[in-house]
Structure formats: structure tokens, C-alpha cells
Amino acid sequence: MRSAVEIADARANKPGHQLYAGRARAIIERASIALRSSTWVPIATGFIEPVLYLLAFGYGMGALIGDISTSAGAIDYTVFIAPGLLATSAMNGAIYDSTWNVFFKLNESKLYQGMLATPLGPLDVALGEIIWALFRGLSYSIAFMLITAPLGLVPSWSALLAIPAAVLIAFGFASFGMAITSYFKTYQQMGLINIALLPMFLFSGSLYPISVYPDWLEFTIKLLPTWHGIELIRDIWFGVIDFSSFSHLSYFIVMIVLGLFFTTRRLRDLFMR
Amino acid sequence: MPESLISARGLTKKFGDFTAVDGIDFDVAKGESFGLLGPNGAGKSTTMRIIAATSRRTSGTISILGRDPEEHGPQVRAHLGVVPQQDNLDTELTVTENLYIYGRYFGLSKKFVNKKVEELLAFAQLEEKKDVKVEALSGGMKRRLTIARALVSEPDILMLDEPTTGLDPQARHILWDRLFRLKEDGVTLIITTHFMDEAEQLCDRLVVMDKGKIMAEGSPAELIKEYSTREVLEVRFGSDRNKEVAPILREMCDRIEELPDRILLYVEDGELLLEAIAAKKLHPNTSLVRRSSLEDVFLRLTGRSLIE
């Protein structure tokens, strides 16, 4: 059985060994132990929110609106909003763990300080926490799929590919969410995240096509991750994969890389000055 | 001198214009219990963090088991058990889970850690609390758990930053007893404290720090011998008369210190001096002869003015 010193020494010559000990899974293990005793209310609300939108808008408003014309042809309104709300589920799940929970661990319980006193590096902590947040995004989107499929809102089997895409979206949001949170010091600043998220969700084309906007607004919305997430899932949902789908994918890959980079750097600056 | 585990030369740490640690030199030998004493802001915690490879020095050198923490941070940290000034236990987990997951952070196998956890629960006298969330523990229990947690990786060096601050006397004595056992087992201890009795109890050798510099170094007995006298005579004449009497006492003793409420006289034989004072018909309201302590050394070196 190897000692702590032998384990650390084995990595001494690897590049980046100061940042990464190859043990993000220890952070995930910790999160899974903590989950056992956590309260389920906030977890449930994060999932229920998109479902409520589906019911209220899809079956309420949808009855008034009828079909909606898109690049994939005329589509029933409820079917149109379902993929956008799946993307929202993934984002909600990812953000739940990567913002407020991270803020608490960073500033209140000083948890990361304790972790970084061990041979773990800042990238272990960042990656572990982000992957954990992504799991929640994944489970939300699977649950959403399980609700929408029996309602006849999933057009084809290939729409199942929306799940791995939702993982990518969740990864992007978790990564960016943790990066932003790591720079925030007060509860007021954290409140900004919530303030930003709701309009981002409402106006990014989850409930109607953004072609209704004037050009400048449409352009602005197209810069936001929520729009890219909703469009990516919608492309997969209706099987219209084209160049723009890949641009959405790349958007999230860049988001993941940037988020990981800044989170790691910030943790190092905070705890290894 | 036995093998040196830690060796620092000209160690300096600046935060902007502020110099927290100002070119200090020290060595810590294997199995030694080494103390860093000093008032708040003396640079003790910063020094600890540099040793613990969680802070980067500005200049100077430091080697921990032959390694530079800046080049080999994770390897250095694998040798250390860290007990920070403020408990940073995992409040979402139970006592057992806290110990277990900390071992996992070091990459230790589940089998090894599970066995170690049982041992540490007994060591920290927390067996009855093992399934309790840490929130529900008393201050002393939390401290013992933090120490047990630091031991899960079987470290060569245990770093304790003010281990008993905020604990009641009972809890402190239990903790000292635990630390004593570790010392007997050959664990090297590095302790910061501003409790002199703690330093006398636990430290084989210590340095007194003030404003980032080392003011003195030695064993508690050596420091007392060098910076104080064998005994201290404390006399009180009442705050009005103290001023009158002080010049007379000053002639009878090499070193006296006037405080608002009493006068301290540093001498080899306190009783003898007290008799001499009585012979001059100066009758203090109260008098006390005591042995010199580390506290006298500390106050002499770092002054009596309040540092905030």
C-alpha cells in the first residue's frame, strides 16, 4: 500500500503537477458523500422550474398560439419550447452547484483552503466541483426527457443525442459559473448572478424565436450562452444539424476551457499566494 | 545536531509594501518540537504557510525534507499535517466522513483510510461522536478532530497554528496530552502560539518573532536564563505610592519594571530582596516572589504596548 509521500512523489516530474494531482475524483467522492445528507428541496425546485414553464407556456399559451414556423417547418408550440427548456434544465442544474454552493465553500466553510493544504492542486478542486455540477445538469436533463417523451414532445430517437449535448452545456455553465463565483466576495455580488440568469433565459429564444427582435437585440442575444445552448438542443431535437450547430458546440468548448482556466488561476491566487 | 527537516535562510515575504516575514533563518530537526512565538502580526502564520507550501516566499531559501516547496508543493504537502488557526472542517459531513475524505485527498486507498479512521477516532477520543455532523461538536472536539484529520496521511511534520486559542482549560489540557503522545511517537511538531505556558509545555526549542524578525532563539530554559532572571518579585504599593517608591527600588535592583498597578523586580533571590525592602520600612500592600517564566522573556523582547 502506497504512502501519501510515495503517491505524491510519483507525479513529481509530470508537467503541471503543481496544479493538478490527477485526483478530481476525490472531490467528486466528497460531493457524493455530502449529497446523502443534503436537503432535497432546492434540488427539486431547480428541476421543477422548466417543467412548470413547459406546462404553463406549452399547454396554456400553446393553445392560443398553435403552430410556429421555423427552419424545420411548422411545429406545434409545445414541441417548439420543449428542447429550449431541456437546455434550461441542464443550465439550472449546473449553476445550482457551481455558484451558491461554491460561494459557501469558498467563503464560509473554508473548504477549499483545507483541500489545498493537501497535495491536491487547484485544478483538481476546479475540475472535481465542475464535473459534479455537471452531473446535476445531466440528471435534470434526463428527468426532463423522461417527462417530455410520454407527452409526445420528442420527435425522434435521434433527439436522445440532446442528452450528451446537455452535458456539454452543463459543463460550460458550471465551469463559467464557478469562475465568476470565485471572483465574488459578497452576497450582493452573488445576487447579480440570479438577476442576470432570468432575463437570459426568458429572452434567449426558449419561448419564441428571436427573429421577432430588432437586429441589434438579436445580435446581442446571439452572444449569450443561453441562446447557443437552446439552439444547439433545438438543432438536435429536430435533426437539423448544420454549420451553426458546430458553432454552438465550439462556443461551449471555449466556455469550458476559459472557465477552468480562470477558476484554477483564481484558486491558486486565493490559497497559494 | 540531528538531521535537519526544515531549513530556512533569509526567508522573506512581502505583501505589497508590507514585510510580513523579514529575512529569518531557522532550522528544525527531526523529532523536534519547534515553537514560533510572537504577538499578533509578528509573521508566525505567514511563516507557517510558506513551510506548508501554500504561500510563496518573496526571497530567501527554504527546504523541507530537502525540497523547495515552490518547485515541489504537492510533494512537500504530502509530508505535512496542517492544523490551521481557524477550523476548516467539512461542515456538511460527519466526524468519520471528515477523516475519511481527507485521506482520500492524499490519494490513499479506501482500505487504508478506513483502518486509519478507526485509529484516529480513538486517538481524538471521538468514538462516541463518530456519526455526528461536525457542527454539533464543542470547540475542543472540533480542534481534536482537526488534529486527527491532519494525521490521516501519517505526516512526518505536524503544523499547528495556535492550536488551543479559544479553548477552555480542560480542553487545552486534553489537547496538550494528545500532542505530547505524538511527540513521543517521533512526529516533528511546529507550533505557533501566544500562550507562554503552552510553549513551555510543548516546545523543545522556540524562536520569538516580532515584526517579521526573529528576536531570540533557544529552549524555554535557555531563553529564561538569557533574557530574564531566576526570580521575579512583584510588589504593589497602591497606584499612588508606586511612583514614590520606584526610584528607591531602582537602586536596589539591576532591572525593574514599573507597571500601572505593580512593580516588577528581576532578581536571583526574591525573598532576599523583599527582606531588604522591608528593612527600609517600605511595606508593600502585597508582594509575590515567583520564578521567571517565558512570559517575562516574551514581554521583554516584544514590549508591553498593545499590538493591534
Image (spheres, coloured by chain):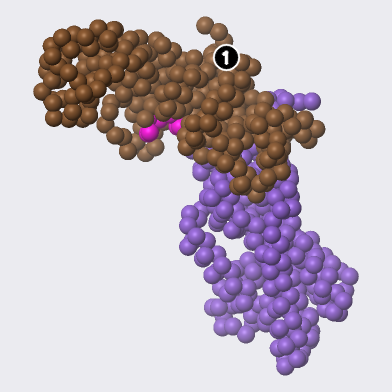
Chain colours: A purple, B brown
B294 vs B96, left or right, is left
Identify which residue is drawn at 77% across, 89% down.
Answer: A67
To which quarter of the image does residue A240 belong?
Answer: bottom right
Q: Position of residue B158 (x, y in %)?
A: 58, 25
Q: Which residue is mark 1?
A: B30
Nearer the observer, B270 or A143: B270
- Viewer-closest of A87 and B48: B48
- Residue B78, quarter of picture: top right
Asked if residue B41 lies in the magenta stretch, the reply is yes
Asked if residue A197 lies in the magenta stretch, the reply is no
Residue B112 vertical position relative to residue A51 in the rendered view, above or below: above
Q: Chain of mark 1?
A: B
| SS for dot 1 | loop
Residue furthest to the bottom in view is A64
Q: Is residue B13 above or below residue B187?
A: below
Residue found 21% across the figure and 9% down from its top = B275
Is residue B70 in view?
no
From this view, report whether residue A268 is shown above or below residue B239.
Answer: below
Q: At 29% across and 18% down in the image, what residue appears?
A: B288
Q: Is residue A236 above or below residue B260?
A: below
Judging depth in this view, the residue of A16 and B75 nearest the camera is B75
For residue A114, what is the image quadrant? Answer: top right
Residue A213 seen anywhere in this rendered image of the structure: yes
**Residue A168, percent from left and from top:** 72, 59
Quarter that holds the C terminus of chain B: top left
Magenta stretch in the rendered image: B40-46
Number of numbered markers: 1
Residue at (63, 66) in percent of width and height? A225
Along the horizontal axis of the image, is B88 left or right of A132? Answer: left
State the image coordinates of residue A143 (x, y, percent, origin top left): 80, 67
Give the amino acid at mark 1: Lys
